[in-house]
Image: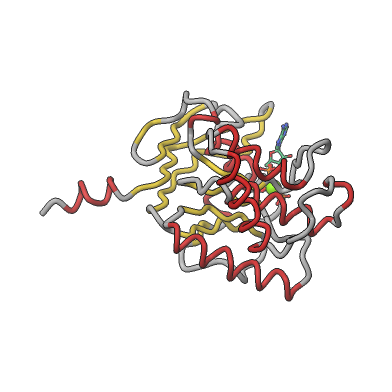
Amino acid sequence: METGVRIVGNLAVQLVNLTKRYGRAAAVDAVSLEVLRGEFFSLLGPSGCGKTTTLRLIAGLAEPDAGAVKILGDDVTDVPTNRRNIGMVFQNYALFPHMTVSENISFGLRMHKVGRSEAADRVANVLDLVRLRGTGDRLPRQLSGGQQQRVALARAIVIEPKVLLLDEPLSNLDAKLRKEMQLELRALQRRLGITAVYVTQTISIAGPQIASSPSLSAG
Ligand SMILES: Nc1ncnc2c1ncn2[C@@H]1O[C@H](COP(=O)(O)OP(=O)(O)OP(=O)(O)O)[C@@H](O)[C@H]1O
Ligand SMILES: [Mg+2]
């Protein structure tokens, strides 16, 4: 049987003894976890337990003090963020304030050298998906918090990344919209075969794969 080989080949994200310290405190303390390709992996835990730090380490936005990050089998611990083919929705949105909604969303497409008319189509589609049709010309500050959050989501998914990191991406939405967005997100993730790592403090969206707080530092 070649079971072992098959399993390794199926890993989208692998963290090996990953550690990040700030001063003497470990924000992430020797975390090891494995996320399968196409999996929707929920990372669940209380405030301060290291969820955001873990995502930043996967994305290459923070450098680990020890351990390794592997994406699709490659050790990317020393590979810069822009070469990891990762989409990330930040907890605080981090939209570009001087760019319109459309410019924010198409930014990543320009980086990936997607042509103008295809980019326009993809931006329009993703704006529909997050229920923001007609807001493309506005600036982020002309949107509500929940609308800005959906722009951040649109910006991350429009590039159809191999791995999508989502840090409480629906926290500012009302219950009905949150449910709708959860369903859209799961459908899109399945359809495109994207691997998602989803950080949340609530269990509602958490699927069968849950890394709960004991695996992270108590903070
Ligand atoms: N840049 C930093 N400098 C110093 N300490 C930090 C820094 N970033 C995070 N920390 C600390 O690391 C720990 C983990 O933080 P992190 O942001 O990963 O938590 P979290 O699980 O995302 O929490 P929350 O649910 O509140 O967003 C916390 O104790 C935090 O204060
Ligand atoms: Mg956080």
Query: Residue 192: percent from the left, percent from the top?
Result: 45, 57
Q: In this image, 188 relative to 218: left or right?
A: left
> From this viewpoint, which residue is outermost toward the front?
117
Query: Residue 83: percent from the left, percent from the top?
Result: 49, 30
Q: Is residue 62 above or below residue 47?
A: above
Quadrant into which the N terminus falls: bottom left
Could you tell me which residue is drawn at 63 percent across and 38 percent down?
Answer: 27
Could you tell me which residue is drawn at 65 percent across and 55 percent down?
Answer: 124
Q: Quadrant of residue 183?
A: bottom right
Q: Is residue 209 above or below residue 141?
A: below
Query: Residue 14: percent from the left, percent from the top?
Result: 41, 43
> From this viewpoint, which residue is outermost toward the right?
142
> From this viewpoint, which residue is outermost toward the left?
1
Nearest to the observer: residue 37 or residue 119: 119
Q: In this image, 156 relative to 48: left or right?
A: left
Quadrant into which the C terminus falls: top right
Nearest to the observer: residue 138 or residue 186: 138
Query: Residue 141: percent from the left, percent from the top?
Result: 88, 47
Could you tell me which residue is drawn at 60 percent across and 52 percent down?
Answer: 121
Q: Quadrant of residue 203?
A: bottom right
